[in-house]
Image: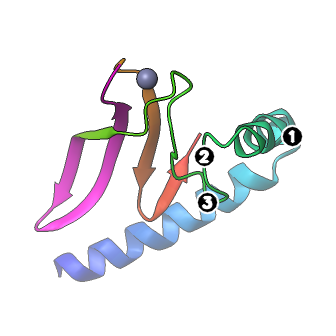
Amino acid sequence: MELLFWKVNMIIYDIRFWIYRHSPSNLNIDKHVKLQIQHGLVYSDLCPKRCPCGCKEQVEHDKDYMGYQIMEYSVKCKKCGAGLGHWAYGYWQV
Ligand SMILES: [Zn+2]
């Protein structure tokens, strides 16, 4: 039952993510993402690569579980504590 709930959640999230990525108001976000990739701060899937301060070490925090399955977590810089990204349901977010 929990697995089914998780799968339904994934589908809802996929749809929300698709709408988010394709809405015209997010063109500026796409530009912002391209710049971050160009500067080597994130990978093409938005996975954080390094902090603008130069530190490559990261700390995972705010982990959210459903059963044993991790659903969401945030990543911050180990050195300066800046928020670098948020991962939820299989995707990295800006
Ligand atoms: Zn930093």
Q: Position of residue 86 (x, y in %)?
A: 43, 42
Q: Which structural element holds mark 3?
A: loop
Image quadrant of residue 70?
Answer: bottom left
Instruction: Give the position of the C terminus as an image quadrant.
Output: top right
The answer to whether residue 64 is magenta is yes
Mark identifier at residue 42: 2
Residue name at image x 88 percent, y 43 percent:
24
Residue name at image x 40 percent, y 74 percent:
8
Q: Judge: label 3 CB < 8 Å from ligand 1.
A: no
Tell me which secondary structure the magenta stretch mostly adopts.
strand
Q: Which structural element holds mark 2?
A: loop
Q: Earlier in the sequence, mark 3 or mark 1?
A: 1
Mark identifier at residue 85: none
Mark 3: which amino acid?
A: Asp
Depth check, mark 3 against mark 1: the one in front is 3
Residue at the spot of label 3: 45
Q: Which residues are magenta?
A: 62-79
